[in-house]
Image (cartoon, rainbow, N blue to C red):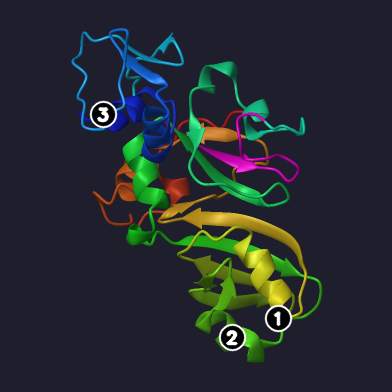
Amino acid sequence: MRLNRYLAATGVGSRRDCDELIAAGRVTINGKVCTHFSAQPDPDDHVKVDGKLVRVAPPLTIMLRKPAGFVSTRKDPHSRDTVFDLLPQKFSRLFNVGRLDAQTEGLLLLTNDGELAQRLTHPRYKIEKEYEVTLDRPWDPVLVPRLLRGIFLDGQRAQITQLRPVTPAKLRVVLRQGVNRQIRRMFEAVGYRVKHLVRIRIGHLRLGDLPRGHWRALTKRELESLEGRTPASPRSASQELRPPIIR
């Protein structure tokens, strides 16, 4: 197992995060700094990050319904509440898969599985993410083609894949990108303000009735679906036996 995959399996971060740790000389194998990405630690090797021994942990992925007001990071320089304040200490080695901005609510995945994180965040996989968007006034459908064609943000074309109305001022929006604050900025570009934003789906995984601030472990079927090993189940998430919801 290559070093970045090994580190990701210990829960220190995604493979991209681990590449940065290796390049910065923060990883040692048996007491020697290792900056070789192709290195493959043996099971009895002592691998350390910043002087702390790391070991491959059993894979774990949980879903959290993030409330507004919490930032999607482990520590915040401005002392704001983080999503890890909602979780027990035993989950301190998990890392979040992607981010939701502070005021956005909804489905957030946390894992120690770097391979899964890579699949869900890398642009080539085009994993769909669905959001419920509440606007400051009724939506004008004549603007739909503009959002589907795309709007340039941060030097790239940001596009909405699907858009359908739920009520006059509430929409369901599907993305296959991850531009910073993409939905809010795209609607601002066409003259609307997003009052409330909730992520309700990642791939085939739906938020369901998970209460705000609560979490639960993913089922085997849900993990296989996210990993692309099984198609979407015709049964709803509520029909499958699931681990308990915990706060």
Calculate the distance from the C-alpha at mark 1 to the C-alpha at mark 3.
48 Å
Q: Residue at x 41, y 30 (%)?
A: 112
Q: Is residue 72 left or right of residue 241?
A: right
Task: Name the magenta segment's main secondary structure.
Answer: loop
* Along the viewing direction, whichever of 111 and 180 lies nearer the viewer: 180
On the image, the x and y values in percent for residue 98 come to: 51, 46
Under tag 2, what secondary structure?
helix
Calculate the distance from the C-alpha at mark 1 to the C-alpha at mark 2.
8 Å
Under mark 2, the amino acid is Arg
The quadrant of the picture occupied by the C terminus is top right
Total labels drawn: 3
Q: Nearer the viewer, mark 3 or mark 2?
A: 3
Q: Earlier in the sequence, mark 1 or mark 2?
A: 2
On the image, the x and y values in percent for residue 59 come to: 35, 27
- Binning the other alpha carbons within 10 Å of mark 2 as few (below 14), some (14 to 19) or many (20 upward) gives few
Q: Is residue 73 magenta?
A: yes
Q: Which residues are magenta?
A: 59-75
**One can see residue 84 in this view:** yes
Kindly identify which numbered label has been placed on residue 36. Answer: 3
Residue under label 1, please give it: 190
Residue under label 2, please give it: 146
Kindly identify which numbered label has been placed on residue 111. Answer: none
Under mark 1, the amino acid is Val
On the image, the x and y values in percent for residue 142 come to: 65, 92
Under mark 3, the amino acid is His
139 shown above or below 129:
below
